[in-house]
Image (spheres, grey):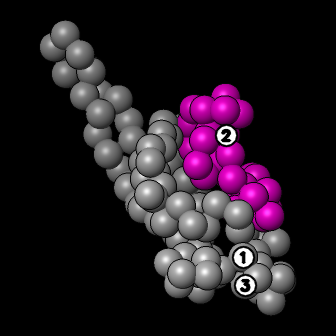
Amino acid sequence: MSLDATIYVEVDTGGKESLELVIYSCNITHNLNKMAMEAGIYEELWHPESIKAEYAKDIIEPVEEGLKKLIAKPEHFEKFNSPNGWGSYKHFVPFVEEYLKELKKHPKARIKTGT
């Protein structure tokens, strides 16, 4: 199981339904959910709808704060590495950094996740 996060915009093409134009998409193992919880960014990354976050701008600040926590205490967060080797601090931090960069580039874009 994994997290699929997408940043997208809806485009009215004149048809019956709008078109979703994907700006950015990423995937990471669900085994990092405990690390995300400890950093305070689980809902923002895995279930933004649960905190009524619909747009990138809605989660930029908490994701930024969570990233600061992750970077400040690597030894602490490495305790949450997956015992089976699928999901580690060294992969999670770059994932969060890249996702945050894209959120900041497109604050008015919509966000959605799936597993």
Tell me the residue that label 1 is attached to.
80
Is the residue under label 3 in contact with that under label 1 (CB below 8 Å)? Answer: yes
Real-space Cα separation, disc 1 to disc 3, in angstroms: 5 Å
Q: Nearer the viewer, mark 2 or mark 3?
A: 3
Q: Secondary structure at mark 2?
A: helix
Is the residue under label 3 in contact with that under label 2 (CB below 8 Å)? Answer: no
The question of residue 38 being in magenta is answered with: yes
Q: Quick check: 77 left or right of 12? A: right
Disc assigned to residue 78: 3
Q: Amino acid at mark 3?
A: Glu
Q: Quick check: 27 left or right of 56? A: left
Considering only order in the chain, which callout, 1 or 2, is on the residue closer to the N terminus?
2
Q: Quick check: 10 left or right of 29? A: left
Residue 44 on image: x %, y %:
66, 47
Residue 63 on image: x %, y %:
70, 57
Tell me the residue that label 2 is attached to.
58
Q: Amino acid at mark 1?
A: Phe
Give the quadrant of the N terminus.
bottom left
Q: Nearer the viewer, residue 115 or 23?
A: 115
Residue 51: image quadrant is top right
**Residue at 82%, 72% in the rendered image:** 69
The residue range painted magenta reads 36-65
